[in-house]
């Protein structure tokens, strides 16, 4: 991912009050602190210093809107039928928000480009977890996907891998995952996770 995108994603991943605080700090530094040490810039920065805070103000507004949309997405779920009706982008966002409310730092890894078997990256207590989301409606997830995810987890050096599906997993898939740092979340477990997240504070 390009460095610019990482910076933008990092800002959008911060709570909106944090971005607002950064904007205020940048404004104060540009308008007052820098001119105090570099008097030659005092005249120009006293007029234009606020411009440097604009990116953080925009990020605060975008982060606030994103938080509201994620909360609404959670609250709209009434059962597996509503979850299955989501687009794959909404499904990823829903799963990501449910994990975020469990205290994870969540990064969307998917999108239009190939994701290499990773949709979300979770970080918590120095542990890194990769997540793959499969919004299948009436399908059992077989062992091949679980095996592939295990390979991606190993290649990425992640501590754990999670596969999330609206459906069920075959017995062979469960047997392969047994004893490995792989969690298989089926439709019922996902519904319970979403319900718990919707009752928690955003």
Image (cartoon, rainbow, N blue to C red):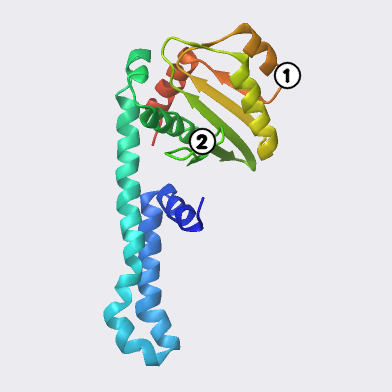
Which residue lies most toward the top here? 171
In the displayed structure, would residue 142 be above or below residue 73? above
Is the C-beta separation of discs 1 and 2 under 8 Å?
Answer: no
Q: Residues within 10 Å of mark 1 (few under 14, many from 20)?
A: few
Residue 173, given in percent of the width and then of the height, sits at 63, 13
Which mark is first along the chain, 2 or 1? 2
Instruction: Report helix, strand or loop for mark 2.
Output: strand
Q: Residue at x 37, y 53 (%)?
A: 17
**Relative to residue 110, is residue 159 drawn left or right?**
right
Residue 151, quarter of picture: top right
Which residue is found at the position 35% from the left and 58% from the top?
20
The alpha-carbon separation of the residues under discs 1 and 2 comes to: 23 Å
Query: Residue at point 34% right, 54% down?
Result: 60
Residue picked out by circle 1 = 179
Q: Is residue 172 above or below residue 37?
A: above
Q: Is residue 123 above or below residue 193?
A: below
Question: Residue 120 got which mark?
Answer: 2
Report the front residue among 196 and 61: 61
Q: Which mark is residue 82?
A: none
164 over 100 or under it: above or below:
above
Q: Please identify the quarter of the rendering in which residue 146 is found.
A: top right
* SS of the residue under disc 1: loop
Q: Residue furthest left?
A: 47
Residue 155 at x, y = what percent?
Answer: 68, 37
Is residue 112 found left or right of 170 in the rendered image?
A: left
In the image, taking residue 161 as reference, residue 112 lies left or right, namely: left
Mark 1 vs mark 2: in front = 2
Question: Viewed as shown, does residue 73 lie left or right of 114?
Answer: left
């Amino acid at each position: 991912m390009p460095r610019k995108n990482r910076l933008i994603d990092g800002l959008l991943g911060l709570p909106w009050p944090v971005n607002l605080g950064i904007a205020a700090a940048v404004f104060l530094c540009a308008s007052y602190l820098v001119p105090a040490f570099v008097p030659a810039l005092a005249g120009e920065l006293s007029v234009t210093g606020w411009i440097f805070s604009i990116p953080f103000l925009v990020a605060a507004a975008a982060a606030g809107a994103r938080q509201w949309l994620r909360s609404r997405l959670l609250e709209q779920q009434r059962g597996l039928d509503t979850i299955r009706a989501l687009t794959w982008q909404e499904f990823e966002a829903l799963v990501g928000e449910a994990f975020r409310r469990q205290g994870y730092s969540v990064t969307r890894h998917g999108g239009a480009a190939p994701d290499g078997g990773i949709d979300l990256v979770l970080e918590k207590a120095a542990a890194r977890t990769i997540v793959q989301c499969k919004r299948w409606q009436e399908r059992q997830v077989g062992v091949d996907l679980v095996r592939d995810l295990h390979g991606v987890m190993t290649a990425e050096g992640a501590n754990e891998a999670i596969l999330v599906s609206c459906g069920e997993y075959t017995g062979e898939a469960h047997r392969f995952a047994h004893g490995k740092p792989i969690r298989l979340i089926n439709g019922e477990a996902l519904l319970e996770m979403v319900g718990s997240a919707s009752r928690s504070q955003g």
